[in-house]
Image (cartoon, helix red, strand yellow):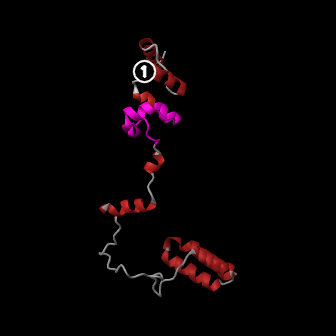
Amino acid sequence: MNVQSKTSARTAALFPDTVDLSSPDALKSLIAQYEWFLPLRTMLHTRTGADDSRLKLLAPWRNESTLSAADIDIDQLSYISNEELIDRFLKEEDLRIVADEDDGTTPNEVQLDPDLEEEEELVSEQLAEIYLCQGLSDKATAIYRKLSLLNPEKSVYFAELIDKAEKK
C-alpha cells in the first residue's frame, strides 16, 4: 500500500462525510446543509455563474476573493517581448560589447579589401591543379616552385609535380 492510499484511508476514517466539490450538485447540497459557509457559495458562483443574493448581501468583498479569481495564464506571465529582452541586455553593465582602443585602429575605419602586399601571392596546391586543368602549365609550375621554397621538406614532392606540369 503506497503513502497516498494510506493518507486517503485515514482521511476517509477521520472524515466519513468527505464530499467531492467538483460537481455543482454536491456544492448545492452542502450549501443547503451549511447555509452560513460563504466559501461554498463563492465556489458555486465561480463554477456556475449563478448569482447568490445571500453572498452579495453578506460578503460584497467576495468578488475579490481568490476563489472567484479568474485563471491566470502562466505563459502570458512568463512571456518576454523582444524589446524587453533587448532592454534587459542593455541594462547589464558587464554585457556591453566595446571595441578595444589598444589595437591602434580607429573604430570608424572599415577595411573592405584584404591587406595583401604586392609581393605576396596566394599559392596552394589546389590553385596549381586548377591552372593545370585550364591548360596554364606555366602558372602551375611557378606556384609549385614557390610552394617548394615555402616547404623545403616537400621539395621532392613538388619537383615531381613540376616535371608533370612541364610535360603537359
- For the residue pair 44 and 77, the one nearer the viewer reads as 44
Q: Residue at x 46, y 13 (%)?
A: 16
Residue 53 falls within the magenta-colored stretch: yes
The image shows residue 31 at horizontal and vertical percentages of 46, 23
The image shows residue 9 at horizontal and vertical percentages of 46, 14
Q: Give the magenta-colored segment's residue range.
A: 43-71
Residue 162 falls within the magenta-colored stretch: no
Q: Which residue is mark 1?
A: 34
User: Can you say whether 120 is above or below 59 in the image?
Assistant: below
What is the total number of numbered labels drawn onto the structure image? Answer: 1
Q: Quadrant of residue 6?
A: top left
Q: Quadrant of residue 130?
A: bottom right
Q: Quadrant of residue 11?
A: top left
The three-letter code of the residue at mark 1 reads Tyr
**Image quarter hosting the C terminus:** bottom right
Q: Residue furthest top?
A: 13
Callout 1: SS = loop
Q: Residue at x 42, y 30 (%)?
A: 54
User: Can you say whether 158 is above or below 51 in the image?
Assistant: below
Relative side of 151 to 160, left or right? left
User: Can you say whether 125 is above or below 53 in the image?
Assistant: below
The image shows residue 97 at horizontal and vertical percentages of 35, 67
- For the residue pair 30 and 78, the one nearer the viewer reads as 30
Q: Is residue 86 visible?
A: yes
Q: Is residue 20 visible?
A: no
Q: Residue at x 41, y 29 (%)?
A: 39
User: Can you say whether 153 is above or below 109 in the image?
Assistant: above
- For the residue pair 28 and 106, the one nearer the viewer reads as 28
Mark 1 surroundings: few (<14), some (14-19) or many (≥20) residues within 10 A: few
Q: Residue at x 44, y 82 (%)?
A: 111
